[in-house]
Structures are given as C-alpha cells and as structure tokens.
Image (spheres, rainbow, N blue to C red):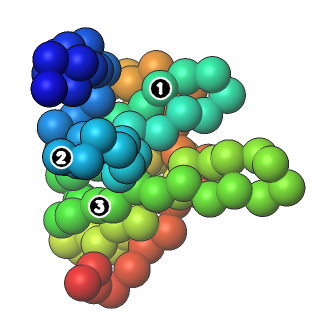
Amino acid sequence: MIIRGCIKRAIAPFYHVDDYHIDGNLEFLGRTDAQVKIRGFRIELGEIEAVLAQHPQIQTAIVTVREIESDRQLIAYFVSNAAPPSDRELRDFLKVKLPVYMLPAVFIALDTLR
C-alpha cells in the first residue's frame, strides 16, 4: 500500500490523472490540446485559427496538419463572408501576427465547415 501511494504521488506531476489506473498501470491517452510539432517547433493550431478568423473576410477557420513523405505541413480551411481572399492576402495578414513557422502552407476555401 505504501509503495503504491508513493508511485502515485511520484508520477502525478508527469502524467494526466486519466492516464493512471487503480491497478497501477499507465495508459497514455494522448494530448488534451491541439498542439503539434512541425520542424522542431511546437504549434498550437487554435492560435492560428483564432488569428485567421480575425481577417475581415473570414467567417470561420480550421487548421490541420498534413504529412506527406515525413514532411508535415499546416493546412488552413476557411469559410469566407464574401469573395474568398487570395493565399497571398491571407499569408500577408498572418505574417504580421504570427511567426513564419506558424504560417499555413496551403489555404483552402470551403462553402461550409461542419
């Protein structure tokens, strides 16, 4: 009993509570946020989405990661209020507010997002 309690206290700072089972086993359930790692940088996808949604022509946006032959790229899907802005316009808008490594490689306009 004492050992089990010591182990539980020892691992508590390192693992999410849901990862630890009563029987002493650990089950890694993954990240609880939308953080990804691309070319050595940790990126919060929601941060890119929030900045992209500030563009006056963007109604809503979602950013995902696409992996092609071990190269990971950010892809932005968006719904616009009017005519969709160009990739260049969106990239220029984001460059002012985000570091270069957080800029999506591709912007894809959609009619709706579900």
Residue 62 in the image: x percent, y percent? 33, 61
Residue for badge 1: 42
Point out residue 66 in the picture as x, y percentages from the top left corner.
Answer: 62, 59
Which amino acid does the dot numbered 3 rest on?
Ala
Q: Nearest the camera: 92 or 114?
A: 114
Disc 2 from disc 3: Cα separation: 41 Å
Q: What is the quadrant of the N terminus in the image?
A: top left
Sort mark 3 into few (<14), some (14-19) or many (20+) by Cα contacts within 10 Å. many
The quarter of the picture where residue 5 lies is top left
| Circle 2 or circle 3, nearest the eye | 2
Q: In which image quadrant can residue 15 be found? A: top left
| Mark 2 crowdedness (10 Å alpha carbons): few <14, some 14-19, many ≥20 | few
- Residue toward you, 30 or 84: 30
* Foreground label between 3 and 1: 1
Q: Nearer the viewer, residue 19 or 40?
A: 19
Q: In 3D space, how far apart are the residues under numbered discs 3 and 1 (Cα atoms)?
A: 20 Å
Mark identifier at residue 61? 3
Per the image, label 1 sits on a secondary structure element best described as: strand
Q: Which residue is mark 2?
A: 22
Specify which label sits upstream in the sequence, 2 or 1.
2
Instruction: Identify the amino acid type marked 1.
Output: Arg
Q: Residue furthest front?
A: 1
Callout 2–callout 1 Cβ contact below 8 Å:
no
